């Protein structure tokens, strides 16, 4: 399945906002979005001077932003949308809750990885367990109550130690419980929209895919 392999920061600049794809770099003065707050390419600086942006363009950009933030390709993202569209409740909220429930996002949110991309690498290399069983599928959906744990043999990895040190500076989300001493954590409840800390207009994605 094809996946974007170019510069991560270029994606942030294209969406003119931080997508937090590079871990600790996103919080420093080296972040390209801070240094060059305009789209990449020859005409990047002139993009912001366009007089009018169509509704379709707004919807497309919002979809691209959310999709890139969670590191998914178009097929994966569309499949998830079609699945949550059948669920009761607000479709946009259900979409974000499902994205947050992915194992790669959970490993990132619990502080065991500096970014979702780093979390996917840890999962694929079998450094992560769910309910004491190794899981190597980043898209695995975590259910409330399931325990996510870093394998005993993997706890000495420098990338995990650095990520956990960085995570100490950020408050733990209300729907998560983290035990740093045992390198474990769990989802207490399915996340509600108000407790998902991303600046996104998910309703625009619903409008785009509902056409």
Image (cartoon, rainbow, N blue to C red):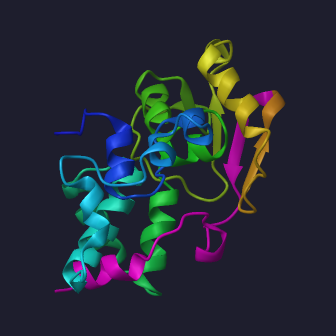
The answer to whether one can see residue 197 in this image is: yes
**Image x and y of residue 117, in percent:** 43, 36
Magenta span has 5? no
Q: On the image, which quarter does residue 77 sit in?
A: bottom left
Q: Residue at x 61, y 37 (%)?
A: 28
Magenta span has 210? yes
Q: Give the range drawn in magenta.
A: 182-211
The answer to whether one can see residue 114 in this image is: no
**Image x and y of residue 114, in percent:** 58, 34
The C terminus - image quarter:
bottom left
Q: Residue at x 36, y 55 (%)?
A: 38
Q: Is residue 142 left or right of residue 99?
A: right
Q: Is residue 134 above or below residue 26?
A: above
Q: How many marks?
A: 0
The N terminus - image quarter:
top left
Q: In this view, does 120 lie to the left or right of 112?
A: left
Return the residue nearer the eye: 69 or 111: 69
Q: Which residue is drawn at 55% across and 64% down?
A: 198
Q: Which residue is drawn at 62% across and 47% down?
A: 109
Q: Is residue 109 above or below residue 202?
A: above
Q: In this view, does 149 lie above or below 197?
A: above
Return the residue nearer the eye: 29 or 1: 29
Q: On the image, which quarter does residue 59 sit in?
A: bottom left
**Image x and y of residue 210, in percent:** 22, 85
Return the residue nearer the eye: 80 or 159: 159
Q: In this view, does 188 lie to the left or right of 210?
A: right
């Amino acid at each position: 399945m094809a996946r974007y392999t170019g510069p991560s920061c270029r994606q942030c600049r294209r969406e003119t906002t931080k997508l937090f794809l590079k871990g600790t770099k996103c919080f420093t003065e080296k972040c390209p979005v801070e240094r060059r707050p305009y789209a990449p390419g020859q005409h990047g600086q002139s993009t912001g001077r366009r007089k009018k942006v169509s509704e379709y363009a707004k919807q497309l950009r919002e979809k691209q932003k959310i999709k890139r933030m969670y590191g998914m390709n178009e097929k994966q993202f569309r499949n998830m949308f079609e699945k949550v569209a059948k669920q009761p409740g607000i479709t946009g909220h259900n979409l974000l809750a499902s994205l947050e429930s992915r194992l790669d996002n959970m490993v990132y949110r619990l502080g065991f990885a500096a970014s979702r991309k780093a979390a996917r690498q840890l999962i694929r290399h079998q450094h992560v367990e769910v309910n004491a069983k190794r899981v190597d599928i980043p898209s695995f959906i975590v259910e409330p109550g399931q325990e996510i744990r870093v394998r005993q043999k993997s706890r000495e990895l420098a990338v995990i130690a650095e990520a956990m040190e960085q995570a100490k500076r950020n408050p733990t989300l209300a729907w998560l419980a983290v035990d740093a001493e045992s390198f474990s954590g769990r989802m207490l409840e399915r996340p509600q929209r108000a407790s998902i800390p991303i600046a996104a207009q998910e309703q625009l994605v619903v409008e785009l895919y509902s056409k």
